[in-house]
Amino acid sequence: MKISVLCASLVIIAVTCSMPALAQEKYLGGSPQLTAYISGTNEFSPGQDATITVVIQNSGTNAVTFYNQGTLPQADLPTTAKLVTVSLANGGAPINVTTGTQMLGDIPSPGVTAASFSATITSDATLGSYTVPLTVQYSYLSNSLANQPASDQVQSVYTPVTVTIPLTVMIKPVVQVQVINADASGLAVGTEGYINLTIRNTGYEDGTKATVKILQHGDSAIIPTDDSVYVGDFPRDGVVTCLYKVSVSNAAQAQTYPIDIQVTYTNSDGETVTSATDTVGIPVAAKLAFVVTSPAAIVTQGSNAVISVEYENTGSITAHQAEARLSTYGPLSTSDALAYLGDVPPGGKVTAQYAISVASGASPGTYPLNTEVRYRDELDNSQVSDTVTANVQVTPKPATAPAVQALEIGLVIAFIIGAAAYYVFVVRKKR
């Protein structure tokens, strides 16, 4: 009996000794080691919209590893950067960063993550190298469980860290466009005209095989018809003058509208590149209009008359080869509804004449007749003004006095008698 109990006890002890120990590895010392660099190009041009992609790398290492330290697992490694946030500032560089602080989460070691920042290089940025600061904030496990007793209680202490990592960006030489003068000729609502631009290269690059282009700015009412002018060499501080044909939308108003200008050229590396865009405002005049300035023409019932209608150009451009048309109706009619006016400058007045026939049964009163002017714009395009009104006043036929009526009757009778006497005399003489 004692022997069997002893054997059972030995078996239990052997099984117990053969079970694996629930020990945990622990780490002592070490912390995150973060570095950063710009991925891709770090060269940018003045006026350029850029995306700066930054790679953040954690290469921290643990100092000491302990084995069989208690039964509870370690929640974090001291080399893990916890709750990482990054932000990029300009640091005095000619860059406007539009992306705010970004949250990247945890970065273990070894580990890599990336963040992209939208930025705009200022249009007056000068050639050179600039440093922009990347601010990284995180926390890490600053106490190790290795120096805590092997127990069921764990005390974790996290320390916040802020580190600034300098990054380098380069502003490279480019052709930079500056419009120093812009003249518009014949630009009014609904017409075509010219824009004459004087442009300077304010950049640090000597462009060759350069072409200066104008572009419609968004939904601007000014639409290029001829949009490119080849200028060849466009050196630094060089000035060129370019003439462009443009049209103006019929829906435009009398105001200033923007256009965009850019240069496509070959740089010193033999590459074909396009400059940043410059924008300039171009004034557009109101649609050319004519008004009738003459008073109502007076005509009489049952008569034929020539009336005069005076037109004034109230627009700000010249109406070339203008021709007026008069529309009649009802008791008024005309056999010649057109009148040539010639070139009418802004503020100019010109008179047209029309032959009018008035029916004898026309009611007295004022008749508004429609009239319009067809003309040619600066680019010889045919245009038609809005319709305006020319008034014609019909007056009653003057009443005939009784004495005058009797005289008229007497004259008629005398004429008849005279004609009869002449006939009788001539006929008898022949016989």
Image (spheres, helix red, strand yellow):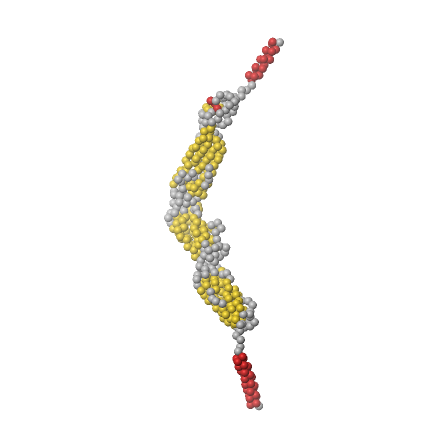
Q: How many marks?
A: 0
Q: Is residue 251 above or below residue 414?
A: above
Residue situated furthest right in the rendering: 1
* Residue at the (47%, 60%) spot, across then down: 289
* Residue at the (44%, 34%) spot, across then down: 136
* Residue at the (39%, 46%) spot, across then down: 203
Q: Position of residue 133 (x, y in %)?
A: 42, 36
* Residue at the (47%, 33%) spot, across then down: 84
Q: Is residue 129 left or right of residue 419?
A: left
Q: Is residue 182 above or below residue 405?
A: above
Nearer to us in this view, 61 or 413 = 413
The answer to whether residue 221 is seen in the rendering is yes
Quadrant into which the C terminus falls = bottom right
Nearer to us in this view, 242 or 268 = 242
Q: Position of residue 228 (x, y in %)?
A: 45, 52
Nearer to us in this view, 86 or 216 = 86
Q: Position of residue 362 (x, y in %)?
A: 55, 70
Residue situated furthest front in the rendering: 402
Nearer to us in this view, 113 or 294 = 294
Q: Is residue 393 above or below residue 180?
A: below
Q: Is residue 411 above or below residue 254?
A: below
The answer to whether residue 335 is seen in the rendering is no
Residue situated furthest left in the rendering: 237
Quadrant into which the N terminus falls = top right
Q: Quadrant of residue 173?
A: top left
Q: Position of residue 143 (x, y in %)?
A: 46, 25
